[in-house]
Image: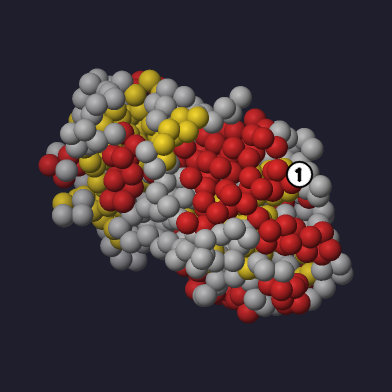
Amino acid sequence: MFVTKNMPEITSPVEGIVELMPTERGLDVVLNPTGTPITDISLTWQFDVKPYTRSLGDTWGVAVNNIRWAAREDLEFSPWYFTLTNGERTVCFGVKTLPNAFAAWYIDEGDFRLVLDTRSGGEGVLLKEPLCLATVISMESENGESTFAAMKRFCRMMCEKPVLPSSPVYGFNTWYYSYGKITRSNMMRDAELCATLASGRVPGAPLPYMVIDDGYQMPRTPAFNGGPFLPNDDFGDLRAVADDIRERGCNPGIWVRTMLVRPDLCPEIPEEAFSPMDEYSRGSGGRVLDITTAPAKEYVFNLVRSMRDMGYGLIKHDFTCMDMMGNNFLTPKLTSDGWHLSDRTKTNAQILKELYTLIEEAAEGSAVIGCNTYGHLSAGIHPIHRIGQDTSGYAWYKTRRYGVNTLAYRLCQNDTFFKADADCACFTKHVPTDKNILFADLIARTNSALFISAAPDILKAKDIDRLIEIYRISSKGQTEAEPLDWLTNPFPALFRWNDLDIQYPWF
């Protein structure tokens, strides 16, 4: 392993604070308490990148721009891990999942540098005891191994103990035709359609998930979509809603935003339980929770547990990245300077991992999808993860960009980190039905999580028949398709599935 055979130079902070410990697992980077705030650790390896012509990086969380193989010299920054290839030989460098710091790679001609962000909020962490920030690993492809297969193997190395669903994941979501304007009666119609689409599932396959997304709760305004997630008058008793969904042949699912609340509706939450990082809540009437405080943890646990207890077999939680970090949550900067939460002894990575673990524990027995979560911090905790930005019921190019592109380039994470959710194939009058059927078909053949969102009366009989077959493929949980043209095409169109080459005309 290159990163252990060739020890890096510690370029910051001062010598003695950081310990490097080579093991069979990789290179453990340990930070010792200093009594002073530490914002980052920087390690530099000498490495000749010139033999490699192509490079691929990742993003902190959901992919918001096209991920693609680029010229090697174009990759200067990559969160979590990066890959270099010349078409025949591939090398991968990264940190194992569930690190205790945010990890970013900076690649130059003759070296690469790993920066471990150890901030707590926007200020340096004040450790009380030694902390292993990350385990650094590297890998080289084997003879004859494709670049995709090498990256898939590297993802398995990064995530030693993934938590995966016990059965295939597929269903329906209300968001991309309603955008929050949903009614109970329309949602019940959606449940009936969802059951129809899954009617051809193979014996032993689970019921489809019928996910109620944002819009069922009050108070909800265009500026506010937080808690305490009381049902509006139209939806009424959420337990009865779940029962009605189940009667229609679906497993109920529901969406929540755990960290944003209306304080006037949550008088039990004291002032000290709110975060100073409130950029996203300003002007909405809501406030973001300081998730390091006991009252905030209690609120989140009780919210998620209540949804589980009311019969929701899937809980989709959203917005923890931005609610924790603020406007910069996907930029190299990650968060603004000069703020901190109540507990300064834990890094931002530790705080978020504890939040995801809390949510998973509260949802015990129900599946969890993390949406707008940091994938490297939730892999090994949540079984399902939304890997990209929103697809769209208004513009096909957004589904192509955030769905097709993201799925192809993060497919190496599917069933190695978690079950990847590339978001919905959307069916409305604004987007082409045939293209979204192709997208649904690709999701099924990649053995990732399949969800659609469909407006009333959009799907014709032939479309429903085609989707029934796609859901049947998804219900098998078969071997995933592999992109064949992804080294040169940002929207891979040629995939191999069960020895069959399938072409997808995305344009």
Which image quarter: residue 161? bottom left
Q: Where is residue 177 in the image (x, y as percent from the top left)?
A: 76, 47
Classify residue 242 as left or right of residue 273. Answer: right
Q: Residue tagged by mark 1?
A: 460
Q: Viewer-proximal residue, 36 or 506?
A: 506
- Drawn side of residue 325 relative to residue 391, left or right: left
Position in image of residue 255 (x %, y %): 66, 61
Which residue occupies the extreme left position in the image? Answer: 5
Disc 1 residue type (three-letter):
Lys
Q: Can you say which quadrant of the picture contains the N terminus?
A: top left
Say if 147 sits above or below 206 in the image: above
* Residue farthest toward the bottom in the current orientation of the protein: 309
- Where is 48 relative to 212, above or below? above
- Residue 466 falls left or right of residue 47: right
Q: Give the camera-side residue of 307 and 119.
A: 307
Q: In which quarter of the image is residue 472?
A: bottom right
Q: Could you tell me residue 431's position as x and y percent?
A: 73, 35
What residue sits 44% from the left and 66% below the top?
A: 166
In this rendering, the answer to whether 271 lies above or below 435 is: below
